[in-house]
Image (spheres, rainbow, N blue to C red):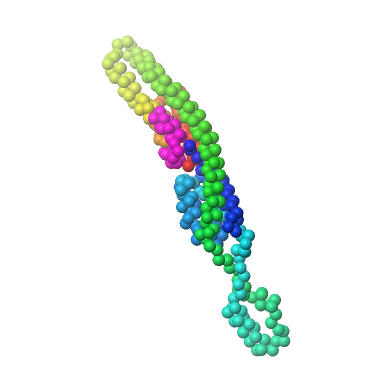
């Protein structure tokens, strides 16, 4: 089942004294690009998170936000920088004595000094947190994938409909090919008779028609287009990431359509090529959303 590259998933778990929330958002991207926002105490788990994501998501920009709360102790602790405080006090006393100041040093004065009280992260057993985080992450990934699959079904339906339209246009172009040669033969014969009368070299005339038929033949391009469409349909039933393959196939289909257009001087075929390219472009836009 194909998956869209866009989606959102959320997972929350409360256990072992922790409440962890994982939010995952995915966007279109040519490759896998993972962006993490972790609380500082969990920074050591970044590699594990990236590996877990890479196991489940193969393509797209992945933005993950992890929040951590504890209901047994605070994540932040206040610490007094005693060495720095001693230096401040010494300097303040020196200033007071040197300039004969009468004010005493107050606690409020000390608290306003930079770096006296520091906020530090409490010690947390990240291995213990990982067990909870992994569960929340699994829920978030499942919800994300469910959404991506749901979007993928819609993309598949739209692309399949457009492939049917492509096939119908190709059938019309193919049917028009022999008619164009007959019309060319008829016009050429009428023109020659107009210039030379009924007495002209039939062999040379037929050779000219054959050269024209060979030069404007689009049989190979039609065959390759149908082959690409068949591969496209088969790929849409694959469980593997297929976005890059489908992108390549749309490029090849567009190339064949361009070749048909360059070979033909018939207005109906040229208009058919324009319709082909329009549908191929719409398919290409949808393919950009597929993992």
In the image shown, does 96 or 54 lie closer to the viewer? 54
Say which of 207 and 195 sits in front.
Answer: 207
Residue 230 is inside the magenta segment: yes
Q: Is 79 rendered above or below residue 91? A: above
Vertical order, 37 against 98 (above or below)? above
Q: Is residue 124 left or right of residue 95?
A: left
Q: Residue at x 35, y 27 (%)?
A: 220
Seen in the image, is 6 located left or right of residue 211? right
* Depth order, front residue of 93/191: 93
Residue 60 placement (x, y as % from top left): 49, 46
Instruction: Specify the segment rendered in magenta.
Output: 226-248
Q: How many marks?
A: 0
Residue 285, x across and y down, in percent: 50, 38
Determine which quarter of the picture holds residue 114.
Answer: bottom right
What residue is drawn where x is 54% and y is 51%?
135
Could you say where residue 172 lies in the image, as x and y percent from the top left?
Answer: 44, 22
Per the picture, the main secondary structure of the magenta-coloured stretch is helix
Identify the residue at horizontal 46%, vertical 28% (top origin).
166
* Residue 254 visible to an observer of this rendering: no
């Amino acid at each position: 089942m194909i998956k869209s590259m866009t989606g959102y998933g959320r997972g929350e778990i409360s256990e072992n004294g922790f409440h962890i929330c994982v939010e995952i958002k995915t966007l279109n991207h040519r490759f896998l690009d993972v962006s993490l926002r972790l609380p500082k105490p969990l920074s050591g788990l970044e590699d594990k998170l990236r590996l877990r994501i890479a196991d489940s998501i193969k393509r797209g920009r992945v933005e993950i936000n992890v929040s951590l709360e504890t209901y047994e102790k605070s994540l932040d602790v206040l610490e007094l920088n005693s060495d720095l405080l001693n230096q401040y006090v010494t300097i303040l006393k020196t200033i007071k004595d040197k300039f004969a100041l009468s004010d005493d040093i107050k606690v409020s004065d000390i608290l306003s000094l930079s770096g006296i009280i520091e906020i530090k992260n409490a010690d947390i057993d990240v291995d213990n947190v990982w067990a909870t985080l992994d569960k929340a992450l699994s829920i978030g990934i499942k919800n994300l994938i469910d959404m991506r699959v749901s979007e993928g079904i819609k993309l598949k339906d739209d692309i399949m409909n457009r492939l049917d339209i492509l096939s119908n246009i190709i059938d019309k172009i193919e049917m028009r090919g022999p008619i164009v040669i007959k019309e060319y033969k008829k016009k050429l014969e009428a023109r020659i008779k107009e210039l030379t009368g009924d007495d002209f070299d039939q062999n040379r005339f037929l050779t000219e028609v054959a050269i024209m038929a060979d030069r404007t033949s689009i049989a190979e391009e039609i065959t390759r287009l149908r082959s690409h469409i068949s591969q496209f349909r088969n790929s849409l039933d694959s469980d593997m990431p297929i976005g890059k393959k489908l992108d390549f196939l749309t490029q090849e289909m567009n190339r064949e359509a361009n070749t048909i257009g360059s070979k033909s001087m018939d207005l109906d075929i040229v208009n058919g090529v324009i319709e082909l390219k329009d549908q191929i472009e719409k398919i290409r836009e949808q393919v950009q959303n597929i993992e």
